Amino acid sequence: GQIFHHKLAQLSSVTLYCPDSVAEIERDVQGCTISLSSGQQLRAQLLVAADGALSHCCDMVHIGRTEHDFDQLAVIANITTEQAHQGQAFERFTEFGPIALLPMSQGRSSLVWCINPEQQHQVMSWSDDDFLTQLQAAFGWRLGKLQHTGKRACYPLLLRQSGQITSHRVAVVGNAAQTLHPIAGQGFNLGIRDVISLAEEVAYQYRHHHDVGSQSVLSRYRQRRENDRQQTVMMTTGLVHLFANHYAPLVVGRNLGLMAMNAFHSLQAPLLRRAMGQVER
C-alpha cells in the first residue's frame, strides 16, 4: 500500500486529495460534481466508487448491496515462520474452514484463520504461545516452526455484492462491487480485473476524445464483468459450503475429489485458470 501510494504521488497526471473524504455527489447529464469534506469541489465525467465493502459513494448514489453471512469468523495476524515462504501462499482446509498464510515482507506471512463464531472467545483469549501451538497443530509444518505472532484481530465473514456495478456517471470496482470470502484468495484478483477492464474502456474513449463516462462505456464495462463476477462468486461460495459441510457421504466424495485432482493435473486446470485470473474479462 505504501509503495502504491508513493508511486501515485509521483505521477503528474494524478492529484491526491488525502486526507479528505467525499461529502456529497451531484450528477447531471454531463458528469458529476463531488464535494469533499475539506470544502473543495471536483468535476468529472466519471466517478469510480472504489472505497471498500461498505462504500460510502455507493450509498450516496443509492446503489444498494446484498449480504450473505457464512457463519464464520476470520482471525488475522502477522506470523513469523522458521522457514522462508519464498513468495508462496499456503492454504489448508479444516473442518471449520480454511487456514491461509500469505507471503509478506521481512519473512512474515499474513494469517487468515477461519473459525466458528462459538470459538471466538477462546481463540482470542489464548496467550501468544498457546495461539501459536494451536495454529501449528491446525496448519502443520510446511513452513517449519511458527515462531512469532503479531496482534490478532477478528471479523465476521460475509459475501457482499453491490446491486449493480454501474449507474449514471458511476462505475463500481473492487470490494465496493463485491467482497468475497477469503477462501482461495480471489477477492483481490477479481477487484484487479474490475479495474483493468474499466481502465481499458476509459483509456480507449479518452484516446479518441470521447466521453469517458458515457452510457456506452458503462454498458461495456458491465457486460465485460458480469460473467467473471458471477463465476468467481459461485466458485468461492461453493468452496466455502463444500468444506464446511460435515455430511459423511459429502466428506468422502470431497476427499476423493481432492485426491483425484492431486493425482491428475488435467482435473486441476479449470480451477487453477480461474484462481490465477486466466479468464475473459
Image (tube, rainbow, N blue to C red):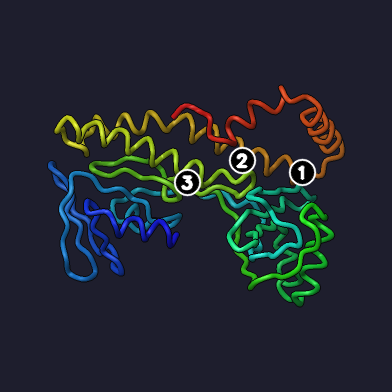
Read off the residue under disc 1: 245
Q: Is residue 120 left or right of residue 52?
A: right
The amino acid sitting under disc 2 is: Thr
Of the numbered discs 1 and 3, the one sitting upstream in the chain is: 3
Q: CA distance from mark 2 to mark 3?
A: 12 Å
The circle on residue 178 is 3
Are there few (<14), some (14-19), or many (20+) residues within 10 Å of tag 2? Answer: many
Picture mark count = 3
The circle on residue 236 is 2
Q: Is residue 103 left or right of residue 10?
A: right
Q: Is residue 243 above or below residue 75?
A: above
Q: Residue 2 at what x, y percent from top left? A: 43, 62
**Which residue occupies 48% across, 36% down?**
229
The circle on residue 44 is none
Q: Residue 97 at what x, y percent from top left? A: 73, 51
Q: Is residue 250 above or below residue 68?
A: above
Of the numbered discs 2 and 1, the one sitting upstream in the chain is: 2
Residue closer to the observer: 70 or 77: 77
Looking at the image, which residue sits at the far top? 266
The amino acid sitting under disc 3 is: Gln
Residue closer to the observer: 76 or 3: 3
Nearest-to-viewer mark from 2 and 1: 2
Nearest-to-viewer mark from 1 and 3: 3
Are there few (<14), some (14-19), or many (20+) residues within 10 Å of tag 1? Answer: some
